[in-house]
Image (cartoon, helix red, strand yellow):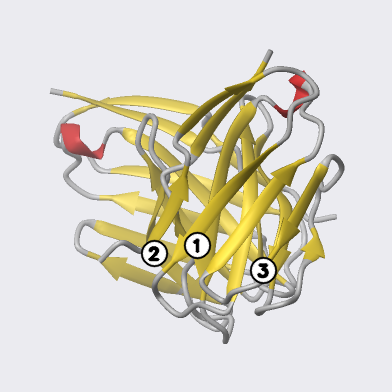
Amino acid sequence: KQEVTQIPAALSVPEGENLVLNCSFTDSAIYNLQWFRQDPGKGLTSLLLIQSSQREQTSGRLNASLDKSSGRSTLYIAASQPGDSATYLCAVFQGAQKLVFGQGTRLTINP
Amino acid sequence: NAGVTQTPKFRVLKTGQSMTLLCAQDMNHEYMYWYRQDPGMGLRLIHYSVGEGTTAKGEVPDGYNVSRLKKQNFLLGLESAAPSQTSVYFCASTGQGGNQPQHFGDGTRLSIL
């Protein structure tokens, strides 16, 4: 059974810092991996999707990498801003496009 | 551009009552999903559908039923609500091909007393 783990569970950093969020998964037979953002009381917003054949994807200040062989993905956020404060979730695609989610990293950016 | 719309947004039920949660998407997506999100448990898949008229069980299907009579709608039913079903329910949809992101609604916050 696929298990997805995100470390740390919570992270607090001052504004302007670059930071890395980690995601690991136990079964490397995935189609792709998706990073989401969730604001309090809201649904999930898709940030980046990395295909299994890709190594990384970039969108603005966000860069996500994927290493299938080691079962790891990282989300890099450059020049963090208070508006980046949210919970970040990673999820892996497995069969019939079912997503298996990690429990998320709650990120706080302090002004 | 509505995307994925869930109704209602909030609901309080008494144990044993029934209700239906509605999910509608306007992106012509084939695949639709119902998840529940609980503290410490993350998001778990309840049921999903790969096309109109089809449904399948996810990780935690017990106590729920679903229907996909129209491509744009996916209904989640609770026949006899239990306190353990208190949760936030999310609907999501995506297109075919395995290379498209899932789009989520804003959730339905359901309390069972």
How far across and down, in percent of the image, does residue A37 sit?
38, 46
Instruction: Work out whether residue A91 or residue B72 is closer to the camera in this orientation and state it.
Output: B72
Q: Residue at x 44, y 36 (%)?
A: B9
Q: Amino acid at mark 3?
A: Arg
Q: Nearer the viewer, mark 1 or mark 3?
A: 3
Residue closest to the eye, A13 or B27: B27
Same chain under badges 1 and 2? The reply is: yes
Q: Quadrant of residue B25?
A: bottom left
Q: Chain of mark 2?
A: A
| Label at residue B68 | 3
Give left or right: position of B15 versus A77.
Answer: right
User: Looking at the picture, how far across and down is residue B4, in whole percent?
Assistant: 42, 59
Of the residues shown, which amino acid type is indicated by label 2? Answer: Leu
Q: Residues within 10 Å of mark 1 (few under 14, many from 20)?
A: many
Q: Whole-Å distance between the Cαs marked 2 and 3?
A: 28 Å
Q: Is residue A27 above or below residue A12?
A: below
Q: Which residue is mark 1?
A: A34
Contact? badges 1 and 2 (CB < 8 Å): yes
Element under label 3? Answer: loop
- B72, A22: nearer the viewer: B72
